[in-house]
Amino acid sequence: MAEPESNPFAQATVAVQNVHVRYRVPSTDAAERRRGANFVKRAARTVLGNDPKVLVRALSGISFVAKSGEQIGLVGQNGSGKSTLLRIIAGLENPARGRVLAESTPVLIGVNAALVPDLSGEQNIRLGCLAMGLSPEQAEEAVPDVKQLAGLGKSIYLPMKTYSSGMGARLRFAIATAANPHILLIDEALATGDAAFRERSEARMQRLRQGAGTVFLVSHAAQTIEESCTRAIWLNKGRLVLDGPAQDVALRYRKWAWAVAKDKPDEAKQIIEKAFSEREQTHVHVEDTKQPRQYTARHVRAPKNARPTAQRK
Amino acid sequence: MSAPVPPPQPSSSATSADVADLYKEIFTGQQAALEVVSTGRLSQVGARPPIGTYLKQLWGRRHFLWAEARAKVTSGTRETLLGQAWLVISPILNGLAYYLIFGLILNTSRGIENFLGYLVIGVFLFQFTTQCVTNGAKSIQSGRNLIRAFSFPRASLPISVVLRSMLNLVPTLAAMLLIIVLLPPAEAWTTASLLFPIVLVLQVMLATGLALLFARMTTVIPDLSQLLGVAMRIWLYASAVFFSIDRFAEYPSIVGIMEANPMFMVLDAARDCLLYATVPDAGTWIGLSAWSVGALVVGFLFFWQGEESYGRA
């Protein structure tokens, strides 16, 4: 497994700078209903049947830089902001504060299974390839490859609404990797795949990373992160707890999760506070350069092994 | 040849990007790491591109637009016994229903020459605008799966709705022309009929502009989709679909308002071309062109301005 530390000259592919995300969402919490708001507002709520809106801080102050060749695992409880972070990196949502910079368009593979439910898997492959900007010829070329990676057999000709969630996820993964994205974001999508598919998908991700790409992987299973990632980021309640080598982060996260599961809040608190204090805070500084680029663009270079290696003068 | 190929030598000298990464080396020893990235190499994700780039991206996705529209047209009738034949049968049945009720039973011509033709043109063409506007307004909602999966210019969705309605319009138009030519009183083709496609082009531009406009407006105020149905019905009655504008001859202000209505101009011009063998007057052409171009430009700019907001669910 490639170790990021050994390669200080790996190019930055994604820079997340002090990102904050908030949502205003309706809440049925009775305490929230009684709190604040004058009489008129409460009366209006009752008449219209609306619930009071509360502010949810989904992410606060996240900063890190991802390098080429890294596979970064995101760990954390349900609702800790992992999926939100991926959506922000993919540019599908914009943060309330801060910004995300990327070298190329990131491709996100989410959990909602169907793309266009009425269409067959095969038609969805074509549509997805075209949506990513491939030409009809390229899309046609990609179809056999995608079919093979998805490995759905004859089911590929059935409407996608008849697929199980695992089948849908496999197809989405196969489609998303058809365009050879440099930055791939995977949101639990592979958790539903069977063993054979997992092997194939891991080979595919390996290939993407060797092409100087970066892969982000969300998973609850710390073991998956430990096995396949080079680096891990632990999120808790929208905050970054720890960012470091996958082994270390995943181990601490497992210990913490175990303490929470065994109902030992003090121990859990101790672990998380220790992690917090040892965390190396990252400040991302963005230089706004308007000068013409002095290096050859990545897509112009030779596709393989073109990663610059460490060479000191 | 079995000689192992040596990996290509790294060709990078110390460029500005590499120097930027060197900063990391220097600063990692400290508790707070500073990461410096430059906008020369990374660009902000999810940022709204300038209008020229946006149009170019949209043009690049033309195959996607076309594929999406075609797929959706057939998916509506997929589970029926007659399948695609319904695309032709239903407008013909529709036209016959109007012939039966208004032409034979009620006989409500009220001084309108060829009332059946008048009615059919009004109903069928107005139906196209209604489809474009109401489905266009829903397009962001219904395309959420695609929005969450791929990044593409979001204007693709409302535009694809218009394309789909145009595909639906083809059999409808055929039925309409058949009714006009075959059923009594039969009309003959004249040179004025050749102008009909131009009227259609202007109508499509108008509908596209409105679809884009309402697509963004309903994402901001979801309640609008409830109001839109009522608004379209009022517009239908205000566009002289079932009756002649001569009814209001004694109220010049009402006539003035109705004549400024772009859909009235569309229907009036279409009837002039197809039924009355006259070339629509210059005022109609100028007024309709102004509406169409205006709606398209305003709708497009308005939609483009909100480009960053559509990913939010």
Image (cartoon, grey):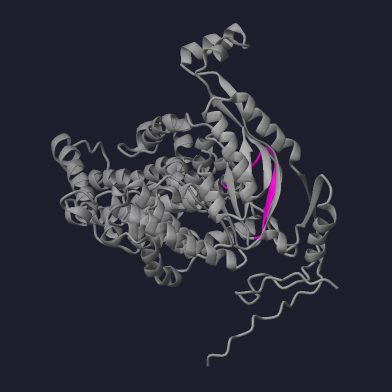
Report x, y in % for residue A62: 69, 41
Name which residue lies at 63% across and 45% down.
A249
Q: Is residue B250 on the magenta stretch?
A: no
Residue range in magenta is: A92-103
Q: Nearer the viewer, residue B192 or B1?
A: B1
Please indicate, yes or no, whether residue B212 appears anywhere in the rendered image. Answer: yes
Q: Nearer the viewer, residue B270 or A49?
A: A49
Residue at horizontal 54 percent and vertical 54 percent from the top: A227
Give the x, y percent position of residue A79. Answer: 54, 34
Q: Residue B10 location, x and y as percent?
A: 72, 77
Task: Decide: is B222 above or below B157.
Answer: above
Regarding residue B67, the answer to whether it shows in the image is no
Tell how many labels. 0
Q: Quarter of the image holding residue B67?
A: bottom left
Q: Residue at x 81, y 58 (%)?
A: B25
Query: In the picture provided, is A228 more to the left or to the right than A102?
Result: left
- State which quadrant residue A242 falls in: top right
The one nearer the camera, A243 or A46, is A243
Residue A102 included in the magenta stretch of the image: yes
**Residue A248 % position (x, y):** 64, 47
